[in-house]
Image (spheres, rainbow, N blue to C red):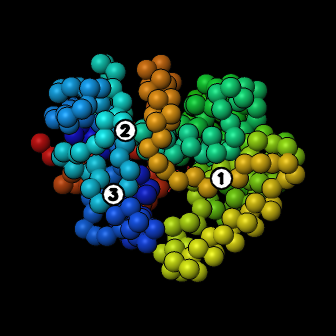
Amino acid sequence: MTAASVNPIDVRRAQGYGRRLLSLLGAGKFPMVLGNDLAGVVTAVGSGVSAFRLGDRVYGTKPPSTDGTHASHVLVKAAHLLPAPPEGDLQALAALPYSFVTMWLAVRGAGLTPQNARGKSVLVLGAAGGLGTLALQMLSTWGATVAAIARPQDFPACREAGARVVIDSTGKPFASLSRTFDATLNFASWELDRLLLGCLHDGAFGHATTVHPLLGNFDELGWVRGALKTMSDKRSHRAALPKRVQNYHWTIFKPEAAALSELGKLVERRRIFLPMGPRVLLTDAAQGFDHVKTGRRGRVLILPDS
Ligand SMILES: NC(=O)c1ccc[n+]([C@@H]2O[C@H](COP(=O)([O-])OP(=O)(O)OC[C@H]3O[C@@H](n4cnc5c(N)ncnc54)[C@H](OP(=O)(O)O)[C@@H]3O)[C@@H](O)[C@H]2O)c1
């Protein structure tokens, strides 16, 4: 391993979040090694794998498990890896796959594609975060007109990532927004999800959120009441959609091949990157987790000890 990143989900899973539903994937019990993405050099290849050889520089993702990427060595499916460009910062690529794939799933869940996005207006909440920044970069590359809701100190970064309009998240951002958007993306707050739905016009593509109560409902309420509460939460938000809006999507990360393929293309074209935070050794991983817990800017990387 050359590096792995720390995402908000790692911090929450360390506190027990998601244990009930993730137990269905064998990923709910302590002790667990966290981490969903990686960059490194191939040191062994399974039989039947022809895409990679020993010594190849790679980056990629690993689905939630108790055997994650915050480790010195990681066993990963070849299908979940991409070849890294020969030049450039290999460590920094470890910040991208999990966030990019989740963001891509949300964008597609809202009904946007590279073919239909040109000229469409998209509103992004949480625009200065990891997923938000990647959405601004990808959607502006696809030709969409993106409006970013973020703190004023993050406006320059949002514009640099591709936002055409910036809206102050610290005031009352939704008070000034009319129902004109073709798609809305929530990377920040479940409590604000309905207000985003109110920004879609009739017949818009749709909405996706990566922040939803699915895992939390099952943790807090158990299997039966958790399932009932989840159905009711989803139904009530769907009912708040404007007329003829078809897509309402609760995004859940999975290592989607098409998303990884799009990431590979954008990395090759140098169109995708995230602001970096501290790089800490595996033995100092707690410092990296503190950085994420306190909401500081920049993706944290964990590097092997030697
Ligand atoms: N469902 C899944 O499978 C999945 C996968 C990956 C991520 N996620 C979730 O998706 C979310 C985004 O991930 P990320 O990696 O981009 O997180 P991140 O880097 O921490 O960014 C989150 C952003 O949301 C903003 N924000 C938070 N609360 C807000 C509020 N009430 N109003 C306005 N802005 C607010 C933050 O801005 P400030 O710092 O200015 O508050 C920050 O810019 C996280 O909650 C993460 O857990 C879900």
Q: Which mark is residue 80?
A: 2
The kind of residue on which mark 2 rests is His
The kind of residue on which mark 3 rests is Ser
The kind of residue on which mark 1 rests is His
Say which label, 2 or 3, has the lower sequence index: 3
Q: Residue at x 81, y 48 (%)?
A: 245
Screen quadrant of the N terminus = top left
Q: 17 or 169: nearer the eye?
A: 17
Mark 1 residue element: strand
User: Percent position (x, y) of residue 132?
Assistant: 57, 43
Q: Are marks 3 and 1 in contact (CB under 8 Å)?
A: no
Q: Residue at x 33, y 52 (%)?
A: 35
Q: State the residue position of label 3.
A: 65
Cβ of mark 3 under 8 Å from ligand 1: the answer is no
**One can see residue 217 in this view:** yes
Mark 3 residue element: loop
Say which label, 2 or 1, has the lower sequence index: 2
Q: CA distance from mark 3 to mark 1?
A: 24 Å
User: Percent position (x, y) of residue 290?
Assistant: 36, 59
Q: Residue at x 47, y 29 (%)?
A: 261
Q: State the residue position of label 1.
A: 249
User: Percent position (x, y) of residue 291?
Assistant: 38, 54
Mark 2 residue element: helix
User: Percent position (x, y) of residue 128?
Assistant: 56, 43
Q: Which mark is residue 30?
A: none
